[in-house]
């Protein structure tokens, strides 16, 4: 689950610059997880759900567990976009 391919199948761009390249995505994952937690908290306030502190914490943990694979994939994508720039000429060559 959540593995990154070695190279692009069309243009052969190497997706991993160095060993453990995607370790930096853990920092991005933390930020995305905080964003999900804040969103769940705000949604409980908007819908007027009175869970209490324990219920809110439980709902945040459940939401984070459910979205964990998505958070991992998104954080790797965000991390990679810091280093890999889009080049339309490569797209034309690969097509």
Image (cartoon, rainbow, N blue to C red):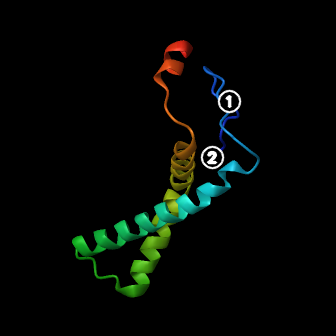
**What residue appears at the point 63 percent right and 27 percent down from the top-left corner?**
8
On screen, residue 24 above or below 60: above
- The front one of 91 and 2 is 91
Is 10 situated left or right of 41 in this image? Answer: right
Q: Residue furthest right?
A: 19
Q: CA distance from mark 2 to mark 1?
A: 15 Å
Residue 37 or residue 54, whichever sits in front: 37
Would you place residue 3 above or below residue 36 in this image? above
Dot 1 corresponds to which residue? 7
Along the horizontal axis of the image, is 68 left or right of 21?
Answer: left
Instruction: Name which residue lies at 47% across and 60% down.
Output: 32
Q: Position of residue 12 (x, y in %)?
A: 66, 24
Q: Quadrant of residue 40?
A: bottom left
* Eye-nearest disc, 2 or 1: 1
**Picture layout, residue 47 above or below residue 86:** below
Marks 2 and 1, the one that precedes in the sequence = 2
Where's residue 66, x and y in %?
50, 60
Dividing the picture into quadrants, the one containing residue 45 is: bottom left
Q: Is residue 6 above or below residue 12?
A: below
List x then y, in percent, for residue 69.
Answer: 56, 53
Q: Which residue is mark 2?
A: 2
């Amino acid at each position: 689950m959540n593995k990154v391919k070695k190279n692009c199948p069309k243009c052969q761009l190497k997706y991993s610059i160095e060993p453990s390249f995607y370790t930096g995505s853990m920092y991005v994952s933390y930020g995305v997880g905080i964003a999900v937690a804040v969103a769940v908290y705000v949604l409980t306030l908007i819908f007027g759900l009175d869970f209490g502190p324990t219920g809110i914490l439980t709902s945040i943990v459940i939401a984070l567990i459910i979205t964990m694979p998505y958070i991992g994939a998104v954080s790797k994508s965000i991390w990679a976009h810091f280093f890999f720039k889009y080049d339309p000429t490569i797209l034309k060559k690969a097509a």
